[in-house]
Image: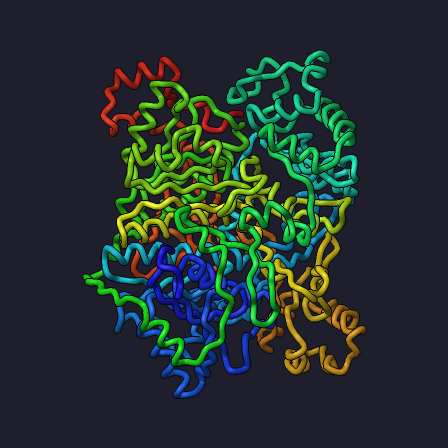
């Protein structure tokens, strides 16, 4: 039985999931204390992988044949006692087998069902496609828009084995399931939820797919400017790896160290980090002596700057960027990467050495912090697996010792459910105009992407979110305003100096007025600001506190207080080396916010778990997650180790085309496409025109055979033929093309009726620019309302209004403003030009 101290103790889950997303949702619920029965067909799981040992830990596994009357009856017996049922097949598949979620919920309104199809059930074009992970990635622009370096090098498309769609879908679906569960505590009514993976990955790429018309040049990086120059001049994209590196900001790139290891520094666009970096390298005073004069207020229009350089703003003028990078290269060669990691970590400068995944799995910090854990699997023996992705501080310790997966008889599974306490829920008529979080007040103290994205995500379900930022900004507007156009939607912005005595009093009033506080900060920062357990309890004993950080785990490790961003997690956990393909050529994986956005969803999961626990027990818990914890989910197909494990040889590097001849990119007569098949599909391929005889082609000649055939027709015709034959395939689309083909004028709807892809055009955006943004549409619920959030207001726009609600008079607010304790704006312009 699962420990009763965990927040989901007593929750019963039936998991029909196969592959990654469905089982991963159930795994996370089981990690948090739910009792989960996983159902496999008699032939075993559809995906035969050691990763199943991770995905099915803490679960009881039952073999049931849904195609038989007895099997269907057994499935319904389990469902009759469940709180949550999960599946991730194509729309309608489970229903045709006799498990229809709509019918089940008519009989049991308290039941919550979660469906995670590849494409949306209201996508008439794609809903029946064989939507394997790579098919979704190709259809959603994931392989075509793999980052600016790849564009400059002419690499298009480029394959990655990271299951990004499944990872995003997992975090959206599990957080939605728990938000619905906590709402059920008030209404007695469950929900029917769908989270299509294509929608999930598009939401995950929100910071990459946004289009800002007439974006000022100051917000375009040297790489973006070089791409535009080459396109306008008709020049080829043929830069070398080293040439792309020289276009990077000196404070956002890799440096080689004394031991030959690469060390990734990302401390740009911050008021203090860049200066600390130069100081610790012994270069700051030297550069001042050579004429470095900084503009300190980067929120002015650039025509009003006193200098053409600011270390806290990017990009730097090329002459200074080259000079600073050159000096930094020389200094980094004087110490090893491990030495620099300790120096930068202790001085609170975000940076990290490059490691391979197999190094991370065995890393001292990963083990001591609980980011990698040991499980005695019945098949593979002692395994190293990724630790929990989210937890509550008061019960996290017991999550570090999960039970291995266990195959049981049907009667044993029934008995496991029956042994749990019976809960009576008084159901009333569901209010379809209400969101899961209506009436919940959230104070969001976080910055950059992960933390703020969690607040925005909670807002779509009805939470009232107040975003609190310093009266004087710490980050450049390229971070706050540009990223904020995505994650500030639906929030009210307050600017306050909480370090001052009067500001502290305002801050304490705010904390006392909310139900949830979210902050991406280390333990050291949390204690300094007075949000540690005892201090928060004295301010607001009923408040839930949710903490995100970079390297944190359930236990403390050597690097728990080190600062970092997503890129540092990519470097630390092997993602950058996989992306680049070698020790010498690490590259960030693809996109802005790849793990950050998952971090936002994971924080929401933690908040949901804490809200559910509070509704059940009255205890206000402290939710935690970290970007490092989520790196395990993103690499779950190969993030494990055990005696006798095969080599870590999954596809890596810029020239990767796929796994093998049946799972790779091919070039049709007009564009690239992805084939996603297996040897079992060879009879189906035999029925496709131009591919007769394919089943008899020797394996070593199969790639050449398919390449020759596919080159003779258009990608559109091949996709039609493959889908007709029931073979997985997709055209490698670009994000720009998807956005162009699926945008509509903002209409006050969340986009859930638009199929697998949906964008809104805001012609009257408060920034003065025309914005096109992906909708908040991945979570589709039958009962709970999903709100279409308004555009992000200018920072500080709600300062006065929020303080008035805290009973401050206008004269008091004016006095606070005059003392620079509060501010109603960082700049006269929404987006400084």
**Left or right: 580 in relation to 536:** right
**Left or right: 312 in relation to 548:** right
The answer, for residue 12, to whether it is visible in the render is yes
The answer, for residue 732, to whether it is visible in the render is no
> Measuring 79% from the left and 40% from the top, which residue is drawn there?
260
Relative depth, front residue between 664 and 312: 312
Relative depth, front residue between 272 and 825: 272
**Left or right: 519 in relation to 76:** right
The quadrant in which residue 181 appears is bottom left
Relative depth, front residue between 690 and 819: 819
**Left or right: 667 in relation to 77:** right
The quadrant in which residue 175 appears is bottom left
Q: Is residue 825 above or below residue 246?
A: above
Q: Is residue 353 above or below residue 388?
A: above
Picture coordinates of residue 550, whole percent (x, y):
54, 41
> Measuring 73% from the left and 13% from the top, which residue is drawn there?
290
Picture coordinates of residue 818, whole percent (x, y):
36, 13
> According to the image, what is the colour scheme of the structure?
rainbow
Q: Is residue 142 above or below residue 721?
A: above
Quadrant containing the N terminus in the rendered view? bottom left
Q: Count numbered badges in the picture.
A: 0
Picture coordinates of residue 782, whole percent (x, y):
32, 62
> Measuring 71% from the left and 78% from the top, which residue is drawn there?
691
Picture coordinates of residue 333, whole percent (x, y):
78, 32
């Amino acid at each position: 039985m699962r420990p009763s101290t965990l927040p989901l103790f007593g929750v019963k889950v039936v998991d029909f999931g196969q592959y990654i997303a469905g089982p991963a949702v159930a795994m996370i619920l089981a990690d948090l204390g739910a009792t989960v029965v996983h159902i496999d067909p008699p032939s075993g799981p559809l995906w035969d992988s050691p990763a199943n040992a991770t995905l099915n830990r803490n679960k009881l596994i039952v073999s049931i044949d849904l195609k038989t009357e007895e099997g269907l009856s057994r499935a319904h017996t389990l469902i009759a006692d469940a709180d949550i049922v999960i599946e991730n097949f194509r729309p309608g598949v489970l229903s045709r087998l006799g498990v229809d979620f709509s019918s089940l919920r008519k009989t049991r309104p308290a039941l919550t069902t979660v469906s995670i199809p590849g494409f949306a059930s209201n996508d008439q074009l794609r809903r029946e496609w064989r939507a394997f992970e790579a098919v979704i990635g190709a259809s959603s622009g994931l392989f075509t828009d793999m980052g600016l370096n790849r564009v400059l090098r002419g690499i298009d498309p480029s394959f990655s084995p990271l299951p990004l769609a499944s990872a995003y879908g997992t975090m959206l679906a599990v957080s939605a399931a728990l938000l619905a569960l906590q709402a059920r505590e008030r209404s007695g009514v469950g929900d029917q939820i769908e989270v299509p993976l294509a929608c999930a990955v598009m939401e995950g790429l929100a910071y990459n797919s946004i289009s800002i018309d007439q974006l000022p040049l100051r917000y375009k990086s040297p790489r973006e400017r070089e791409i535009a120059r080459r396109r306008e001049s008709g020049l080829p994209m043929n830069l070398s790896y080293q040439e792309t590196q020289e276009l990077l900001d000196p404070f956002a790139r890799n440096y080689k160290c004394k031991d030959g290891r690469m060390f990734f520094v990302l401390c740009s666009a911050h008021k203090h980090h860049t200066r600390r970096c130069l100081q610790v390298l012994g270069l700051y005073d030297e550069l001042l002596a050579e004429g470095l004069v900084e503009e300190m207020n980067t929120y002015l229009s650039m025509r009003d700057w006193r200098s053409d350089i600011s270390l806290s703003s990017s990009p730097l003028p090329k002459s200074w960027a080259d000079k600073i990078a050159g000096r930094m290269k020389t200094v980094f060669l004087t110490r090893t990467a491990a030495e620099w990691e300790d120096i930068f970590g202790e001085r609170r400068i975000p940076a990290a050495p490059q490691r391979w995944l197999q190094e991370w799995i065995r890393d001292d910090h990963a083990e001591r912090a609980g980011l990698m854990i040991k499980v005695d699997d019945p098949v593979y023996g002692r395994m190293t697996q990724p630790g929990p992705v989210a937890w509550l501080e008061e019960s996290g310790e017991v999550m570090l010792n999960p039970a291995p997966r266990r195959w049981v008889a049907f009667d044993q599974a029934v008995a496991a459910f029956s042994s749990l306490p019976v809960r009576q829920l008084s159901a009333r008529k569901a209010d379809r105009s209400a969101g899961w979080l209506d009436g919940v007040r959230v104070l969001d103290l976080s910055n950059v992407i992960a933390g703020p994205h969690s607040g925005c995500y909670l807002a779509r379900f009805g939470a009232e979110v107040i975003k609190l930022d310093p009266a004087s900004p710490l980050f450049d507007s390229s971070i706050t305003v540009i990223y904020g156009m995505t994650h500030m939607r639906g929030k009210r912005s307050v600017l306050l100096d909480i370090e001052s005595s009067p500001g502290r009093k305002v801050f304490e009033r705010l904390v006392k007025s909310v139900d949830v506080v979210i902050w991406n900060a280390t333990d050291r920062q949390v204690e300094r600001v007075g949000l540690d357990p005892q201090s928060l309890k004295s301010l607001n004993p009923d408040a839930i506190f949710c903490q995100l950080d970079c390297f944190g785990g359930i236990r403390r490790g050597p690097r728990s207080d080190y600062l970092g961003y997503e890129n540092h997690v990519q470097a630390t956990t092997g993602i950058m080396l996989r992306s680049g393909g070698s020790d010498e050529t690490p590259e960030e994986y693809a996109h802005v916010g790849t793990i950050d956005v998952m971090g936002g969803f994971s924080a929401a999961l933690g908040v949901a778990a804490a809200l559910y626990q509070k509704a059940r027990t009255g205890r206000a818990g402290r939710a935690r997650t970290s970007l490092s914890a989520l790196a395990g989910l993103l690499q779950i197909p190969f993030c494990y180790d055990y005696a006798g494990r095969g080599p870590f040889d999954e596809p890596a590097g810029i020239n990767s085309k796929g796994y093998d001849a049946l799972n790779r990119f091919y070039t049709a007569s007009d564009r690239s496409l992805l084939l996603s098949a297996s040897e079992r599909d060879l009879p189906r391929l035999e029925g496709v025109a131009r591919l007769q005889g394919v089943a008899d082609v020797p394996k070593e000649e199969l790639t050449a055979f398919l390449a020759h055939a596919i080159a003779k027709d258009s990608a559109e015709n091949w996709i039609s033929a493959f889908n007709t034959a029931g073979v997985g395939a997709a055209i490698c689309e670009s994000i720009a093309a998807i956005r162009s083909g699926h945008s509509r004028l903002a209409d006050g709807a969340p986009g859930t009726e638009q199929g697998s892809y949906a964008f809104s055009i805001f012609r009257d955006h408060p920034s003065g620019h025309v914005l096109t943004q992906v909708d908040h549409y991945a979570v589709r619920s039958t009962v709970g309302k999903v709100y279409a959030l308004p555009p992000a207001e200018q920072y500080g726009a709600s300062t006065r209004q929020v303080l008035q609600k805290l009973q401050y008079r206008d004269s008091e607010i004016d006095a606070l403003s005059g003392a620079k304790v509060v501010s109603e704006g960082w700049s006269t312009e929404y987006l400084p030009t």
